Amino acid sequence: MKKYNLYKILGIVILFTVIISYFVPGTTISYGSVSKDTIIPVTIADTFFNGLTSLSVFMSTIVYLLSVGLFYAILGKTEKYDEYITCVARKFARRKSLYIVLTVFVLGLMSALTGNMYAALFALPFFISVIRKLGYGKAASIAATVGATIIGSASSLYTYYSNQMLNLTVTDNLLYKIVLLLVLLLALIAFILVFNKRPEKVDLGKEKCSNVLTLKIVMIVLLVLVVLGFVPWTQYFGFDGFTRFLEFMQSKDIKGVSIFNALVGSEIAAFGTFELYHFALVLVVASVFIAIMYKVKVNTFIAAVGSGLRKSIPYIVILLVANIVFINLYTSGVYYTFVTAFSEKMNLFTGSVISSVTSLFYPDYTYATQFALSGISYTTKTTGFEASIAIIFQAIYSLVLLVSPTSILVFFGLRYTDVSYKDWIKYIWKFFVIVFLVSLVILSIATKGFGLFAIIGTILVIALVILALLDHNKKLIKEVKEETKKETKKSNK
């Protein structure tokens, strides 16, 4: 059955990590020393316990997913959510392309600015629903939302572990990151609007929207809070006003007890320092507010809580199972064996290989960055590699997530829209090949200047785009002929 397709893919990858651990010697890195060990097999029992490790390590993400499930369950109980989606779609009925452009840029820029692919995850179901309402296909809706988020991550302006471990600042590679971001986002928009089928004609009705203002305000406020909460203001601009304001609020006390902490909580984070569990609390508060504003009964609210939590389970399972892959490879030492085999001389080729393979087996960006960069730092003999490997790793790693068999965010989108992994690859592979080559050209210019590789790569990209346009033109002509035949048959009848 299609609904089990994603779990089968993840199961196959997990089985691969188990099998390979019996044949490839492991490598461990401890306190800067690298030692190649003997075979460290990962058994079925180990895989089970690694699942428990995944559960404990990613608990904050699980809480966030549960809060997203609760949020949409409450929206459903208001009986206004579907009407709100229709209202938004109706406003863009004659400007469908504009909505795609806005969606791609909003989600792409949010991911790039926050450096967190999951920060705006709560809004993806909404954007997908509107895009589908406008008549676009399921795969196109995933590309415009999940794809934009991943591309934003590929050119994120600040990534904590990269900057911390490699001693870099926001200004390192800034120009090339901005260029990469704009080029990739524009390429995604062109792919959706030019190379996809035309959106279907849909009847959105003409009824006026009523009583959806609250939902509109809540959604806008939440998107603003994502930016305020997750954008690292101190690292970007040296602005610590939000932190100082929180400290000021917490400093007011009565007999040594902070009034703010007693009433609001001591775990509240300042804007610019949010983690996923902080925003999970925001979503819970928003859910309660919506329930009150739309007079959702207590019993209905409780039922919605149960429904939302149940609907979150498949996404939690995807998260946990996908990360078993990386825990298996890490505990067996196979991953570091691979990294050390390529990291002695760091350049665009070796960096891209390490980044690509890491993306296939290390689906969590935080841990992928931490382990990959530590492995490279301890084993490479190349000096002054830090700035180049930082941009290479984040760009190539994130782009490969578009097709990776362990890509958590893509699998979330596939699960939500009921699209198989096979169908997704058939849809996205041409776009992936082109943007991968485009990224290599930009990265080559960023690290080595406009040399021979950049020239050849540019020519190859132009050739591939022309071939894609010609192929798409043939398909359009074929579709027009088929439609003409159908209309002729109807008129003859």
Image (spheres, rainbow, N blue to C red):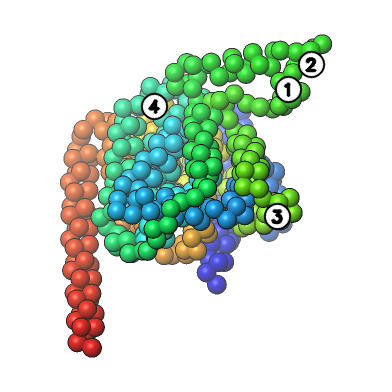
- The span from disc 3 to disc 4 (Cα, nearest Å) is 54 Å
Q: Which mark is residue 492?
A: none
The residue type indicated by label 3 comes to Thr
Q: In the rendered structure, find residue 300 and report the number of the disc placed on it.
A: 3
Q: Report the Cα–Cα distance between label 3 and label 1.
A: 32 Å
Which is more N-terminal, label 4 or label 3? 3
The mark lying in front, picked from 3 and 4, is 3
**Dot 1 surroundings within 10 Å: few (below 14), some, or many (20 or more)?**
some
Q: Residues within 10 Å of mark 2 (few under 14, many from 20)?
A: few
> What percent of the width, then of the height, locates residue 173?
35, 27
Q: Amino acid at mark 2?
A: Val
- Residue 387's tag is 4
N-terminal-most mark, 4 or 2: 2
- What residue is rendered at 28% in x and 61% in y? 198
* Residue 256 percent coordinates (x, y): 80, 12
The residue most toward the bottom is: 493
Find numbered disc 2 in the image and state the secondary structure of the residue it sits on.
strand
Mark 3 touches mark 1? (CB < 8 Å) = no
- Dots 1, 2 in contact, CB < 8 A: yes
Q: Secondary structure at mark 4?
A: helix
State the quadrant of the N terminus.
bottom right
The residue at 52%/69% (across/down) is 2
Q: Earlier in the sequence, mark 2 or mark 3?
A: 2
Contact between marks 2 and 3 (CB within 8 A): the answer is no
Disc 3: CA contacts within 10 A as few (<14), some (14-19) or many (>=20): some
